[in-house]
Image: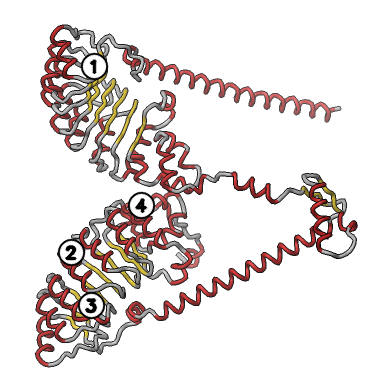
């Protein structure tokens, strides 16, 4: 085959969106954090979802941004946003120019206690106080680079050595010149597990170096470039050669990258020049804007009809004439040269109108998050998150999904939408921060297993309503093993749940304080299980249960902390005599079997199995509507074809004539 024919073939276009999720994540992970936050995440929705993955933010590299970008962008806020996306999985962090004590405190408060590698480059606003507070909360830190931070002294090094026992690599370049030996002694006394040490431009001498060699017995490499007070001769030289595998002498030249990082005069000059250039451009733009406004205003007043009425050239007469003309022609249409028409409006009223307009996008993120949280999960997933980009970013925040409420959706929506898939998506967005979840209609054993497998072990409140035959004892038993913090549980109209599941829940969830078991065909067996395994209960609801007086007595004996008990429609219970007095003495709130059911949300469903009937009626209605639409479409097509045939017949008859 001729190679020219092969080259002439059109090459197949590669669609980057068809790549697997893991491969795309690896490719994007090669870029810097600044590039991801400013451009990559806005390419498409798939890349945006990948950029929201906490695994993407295990490494945050905010280095080599450049002086111009560090001025034009809010780099500190970008770094905080990246830490929030990591959801506590941050392992490697590099900061340049914008590091402060507040930023170090934010690292600790955001739960990034797994941090192992930290690099602080040219962060002149970091002090001993910030580093001391940080060192207490980072016990897993293995690598630390401080280049150069002039306000860091031996006090911070001592705190780092004590708080970070796993520290193996330490770089402290061009530090405080006056305290060289003090820093060396702090390293020798508190960082005994060091393997790699870099001290470029430090003022330590031979005594400080000897202390480091004695205190750091595991040291393998030592960099002493630009340390001109050290004289490697005689015994000290032989000791270094025997103990160290890699030694950089004070006379060894620096490479270009280290030279730029350790000595920052060029950065200061570039920063000053760039700020001066921006200031000059801003002043020129303001001057040009003023001149433009002045010329436009002058042309406008020159065309107005009051110009010919002014006698003399005094400025007062002109101003008086302008004011009179404004009062006379306010909000009236004026024609100029019979071509243009303008409406004159007072500038003050226009500014007042603009000030009264409320822009929801100007609200702080925390306040917007509080407002959106008042809505249900169904409303957020189907409409709210698509309003604008800002609301989309807020809806991707894991804190938004600490509570998932999939109740009160309606039977029609449960048929039209894939609610289980939506619920799984919301669980994924929570990143293991889920605390409260409510499920109605679509709950299954697989969904409970998905909650456990997604790492939501902090769950405190669980509500399962009208899950009928979807949830069984098996699913609840597996779930109870992984939810030791569960405090509130509501099981209403789940017909496959029996005493087996209640026993497992009572044993595995010792913090359970509120339990609702409504209309599940339970009786004395379930009551005895509750009494034996749920001794810490404060609130118990047994709506339409078949227990009798013996089951109620067992509950009162086994749950001494019980404060409220709901026994509505429990027809086999007879509250009389001693049992009645005992309930009144032990309980603060008691609902009798004959109490009204108006305030119970699902009381109508407890008597009727109306769900299947409503679903059946709605599906029949949809089917009928679809058939009617098909009939209308068929009629339209038939009418169009018949009119076409008539037109053809008419045209043929005309031709014959």
Disc 1, disc 2: CB below 8 Å? no
Front in this rendered view, residue 447 or 579:
579
Residue under pointer 2: 164
Residue that label 1 marks: 590
Q: Give the labeled residue for mark 4.
A: 20
Q: Residues within 10 Å of mark 3 (few under 14, many from 20)?
A: many
Residue 105 in the image, given as x and y percentages of width and height: 30, 59
The residue carrying pointer 4 sits among few (fewer than 14), some (14 to 19) or many (20 or more) residues within 10 Å by Cα, namely few
Q: Picture coordinates of residue 3 (x, y %)?
A: 46, 67
Q: Nearer the viewer, residue 606 or 97?
A: 97
Relative to 153, residue 242 above or below: below
* Quadrant of image for the N terminus: bottom left
Q: Which residue is mark 3?
A: 198
Q: Earlier in the sequence, mark 1 or mark 4?
A: 4
Instruction: Check disc 1: other Cα within 10 Å, few if <14, some if 14-19, many if 20+.
Output: some
**Considering only order in the chain, which callout, 2 or 1, is on the residue closer to the N terminus?**
2
């Amino acid at each position: 085959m001729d190679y020219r024919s092969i080259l002439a073939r059109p090459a197949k276009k590669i669609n980057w969106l068809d790549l697997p999720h893991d491969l795309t994540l690896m490719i994007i992970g090669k870029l810097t954090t600044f590039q991801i936050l400013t451009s990559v995440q806005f390419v498409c929705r798939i890349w945006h979802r990948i950029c929201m993955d906490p695994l993407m933010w295990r490494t945050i590299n905010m280095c080599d941004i450049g002086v111009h970008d560090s001025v034009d962008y809010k780099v500190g806020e970008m770094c905080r946003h990246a830490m929030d996306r990591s959801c506590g999985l941050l392992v490697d962090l590099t900061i340049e120019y914008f590091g402060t004590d507040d930023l170090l405190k934010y690292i600790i408060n955001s739960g990034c206690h797994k941090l192992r590698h930290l690099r602080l480059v040219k962060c002149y606003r970091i002090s001993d106080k910030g580093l001391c507070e940080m060192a207490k909360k980072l016990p897993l830190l293995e690598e630390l680079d401080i280049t150069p931070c002039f306000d860091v002294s031996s006090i911070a090094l001592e705190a780092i050595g004590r708080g970070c026992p796993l520290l193996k690599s330490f770089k402290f370049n061009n530090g405080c010149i006056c305290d060289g030996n003090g820093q060396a002694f702090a390293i020798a006394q508190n960082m005994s597990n060091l393997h790699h040490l870099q001290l470029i431009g430090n003022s330590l001498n031979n005594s400080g170096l000897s202390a480091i060699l004695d205190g750091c017995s595991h040291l393998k490499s030592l960099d002493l470039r630009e340390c001109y007070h050290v004289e490697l001769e005689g015994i000290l030289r032989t000791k270094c050669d025997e103990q160290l595998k890699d030694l950089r002498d004070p006379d060894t030249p620096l490479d270009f990258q280290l030279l730029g990082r350790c000595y920052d005069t060029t950065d200061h000059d570039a920063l000053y020049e760039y700020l001066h250039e921006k200031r000059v451009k801003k002043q020129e733009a303001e001057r040009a804007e003023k001149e433009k406004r002045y010329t436009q205003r002058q042309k406008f007043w020159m065309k107005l009809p009051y110009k010919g009425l002014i006698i003399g050239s005094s400025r007062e007469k002109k101003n008086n004439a302008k004011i009179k003309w404004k009062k006379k022609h306010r909000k009236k249409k004026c024609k100029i040269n019979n071509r243009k028409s303008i409406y004159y409006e007072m500038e003050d009223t226009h500014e007042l109108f603009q000030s009264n307009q409320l822009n929801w996008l100007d609200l702080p993120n925390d306040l917007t998050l509080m407002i959106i949280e008042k809505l249900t999960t169904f409303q957020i997933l189907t409409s709210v998150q698509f309003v604008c980009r800002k609301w989309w970013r807020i809806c991707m925040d894991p804190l938004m999904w600490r509570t998932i409420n999939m109740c009160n959706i309606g039977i029609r929506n449960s048929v039209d939408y894939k609610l289980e898939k939506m619920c799984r998506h919301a669980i994924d967005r929570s990143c293991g921060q889920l605390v409260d979840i409510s499920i109605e209609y679509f709950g299954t054993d697989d969904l409970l297993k998905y909650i456990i497998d997604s790492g939501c072990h902090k769950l405190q409140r669980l509500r399962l309503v009208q899950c009928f035959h979807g949830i069984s004892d098996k699913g609840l038993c597996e779930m109870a093993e992984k939810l030791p913090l569960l405090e509130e549980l509501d099981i209403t109209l789940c017909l496959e749940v029996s005493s087996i599941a209640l026993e497992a829940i009572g044993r595995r969830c010792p913090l359970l304080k509120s339990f609702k078991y409504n209309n599940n065909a339970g009786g004395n067996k379930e009551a005895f299980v509750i009494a034996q395994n749920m001794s810490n209960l404060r609130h118990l609801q047994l709506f339409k249960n078949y227990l009798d007086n013996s089951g109620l007595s067992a509950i009162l004996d086994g749950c001494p902390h019980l404060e409220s008990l709901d026994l509505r429609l429990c027809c086999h219970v007879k509250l009389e005599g001693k049992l009645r007095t005992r309930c009144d003495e032990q309980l603060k709130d008691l609902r009798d079997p004959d109490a009204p059911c108006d305030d119970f949300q699902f009381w109508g469903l407890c008597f009727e199995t109306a769900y299947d009937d409503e679903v059946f009626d709605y599906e029949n209605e949809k089917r009928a509507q679809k058939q009617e639409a098909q009939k209308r479409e068929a009629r339209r097509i038939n009418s169009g074809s018949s009119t076409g045939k008539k037109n053809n017949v008419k045209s043929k008859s005309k031709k014959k004539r």
